[in-house]
Image (tube, helix red, strand yellow):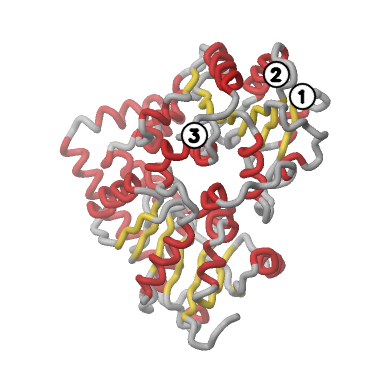
Amino acid sequence: MERADQKHILVLITNPFAIINVIHSGLMAELSGHYRVSVMSDLLTAEDIKRLNEHFRLNMALLPTSVPTVSKPLKWLRTIQMLLFGHYFNLDTIRIKLLERSQVAHWLFCISRKSPSLILLSGSLLIFIRNWLIRSTTLPDLHASVVEHSFQAVISTSPLDLRENAMANSLRVHGIPCISIVISWDNLTSKGVINAKSDMVLVWNNLIALEYDRFYTALGDHALVHIAGIPRFDVYFQKQPSRNHHLTGIPEISPRTPIILFATGAIKHHACQNYLICDLLKYAQNRSGVVILVRCHPGDDPRRYDRFIGIKNVHFFHPFGRHPNQLPPVDFLETLHSQLARCAVCVQVASTMLLDAFACNKPCISIAYDAHSSVHYAQSMKRFYDYSHQQLLPACLKEPLVYSRRELFEKLDKILADGDAPDNLGSVVEPVIHHATPDSVSLATQCIREWLG
């Protein structure tokens, strides 16, 4: 129930994963208990807001105002800025992404890194472009009707998105502060620069907090950074999920049946992962009763797996339905939790599923080999594990890497033979997820409330 004296906040949502992290996690419910919440989104409709309000018992209101658009020249300039950002801070993620596109450009990038003068020049250009982008996206008259709501703060759930930057910059001119939520561990090193002056920033862990301080202090920002953990991970430390929730539409499977959960990666990163499903099927041929459950990435194309239709011991689950552009279903987190709780082992390729599995106290195997040994490094699975955020992982979280089908089979044999997972997996991953208890939502809310006063 809203009160007349409640402060009013605006939440920007332009990314499906922000919906999971902010709404599905329970963070929006916590905020709704203390504030009037309005949402500006290019994803959510009034009908979506109504459905989410009913399911999660919220009182969000959708502003009938569109998210600002960004011109192509500004997008091109931001691409150049990203290269300068990677060059100045020597980010392996940007370097490897450049190698994927052009070996010549990668060579020039590496050679120029040997010149202190060129590094200083890239830093100066980086700051100049960032200040120019902030000025260009600061439009005091943009959506004047929004200012009339007298918001106490604007919360940017995807602060690496230039559209959200434009909204935050324009409102900041009117004295409305900006709270930025960094929603994933790779965002600061893979998505470029936050082109807005954040007043407070919420991050996952101390490692990301140090990254933010390193980057944005050099860029002249001095935001208050709080470590709040991962709101959507709170579900893993709450009550156990329904054992059958993840098997909707799949024939009954005995509780004693070992399930290998394979989480596919984004299609833009992995052109084809069918060879991994084939390898898992080959493994299951000689192990009676093993079932493979393939959880498709939200951006995956279900048609890629038509060749496996009809095979008895492999089942596919599409969390966003069979249309990749759909919004995440309201039970997204519950479904993921139940799948992890039920499986014997998770298999994934350089994704956060490693952290999800360990948080659920499940062993996880990380794939670092390709369909053919002749694949160049620039297109190989191995390159993903050299990204900057992967390098921050403790050594114990890098142990599940396998570099061949033989190594995959050996690790699967060991895990399935041992039966139950070790009891310390949650504590192993704790430095990265920050909490081994369901406290991230309450801590994030507390940080916002204390800061707003």
Q: Quadrant of the N terminus?
A: bottom right
368 relative position to 243: left or right:
left
Mark seen at residue 386: none
Residue 134 can be seen in this image:
no
The residue tagged 1 is 313
Neighbourhood count class around disc 2 (C-alpha, 10 Å): few under 14, some 14–19, many 20 upward: some
Q: Is residue 64 above or below residue 367?
A: below
Q: Amino acid at mark 3?
A: Asp
> Which residue lies under the disc numbered 2?
281
Q: Write down the residue under mark 3.
A: 423
Residue 152 % position (x, y) = 42, 77
Identified by mark 1, the residue type is Asn
Q: Quadrant of the C terminus?
A: bottom left
Q: How many marks?
A: 3
Who is closer to the viewer here, 130 or 205? 205
Regarding mark 1 in the picture, which secondary structure is present there?
A: loop
Residue 207: image x %, image y %? 33, 44
Tell me the crowding category of disc 3: few under 14, some 14 to 19, or many 20 or more residues within 10 angstroms, Cα based: few
Quick check: marks 2 and 1 in contact, CB under 8 Å? yes
Can residue 402 be seen in the rendering of this structure?
A: yes
Q: Earlier in the sequence, mark 3 or mark 1?
A: 1
**Amino acid of disc 2:** Leu
Q: Nearer the viewer, residue 101 or 243?
A: 243
Q: SS for tag 3?
A: loop
- Earlier in the chain: of badge 2 and badge 1, it is 2
Q: Viewer-nearest of labels 3 and 1?
A: 3
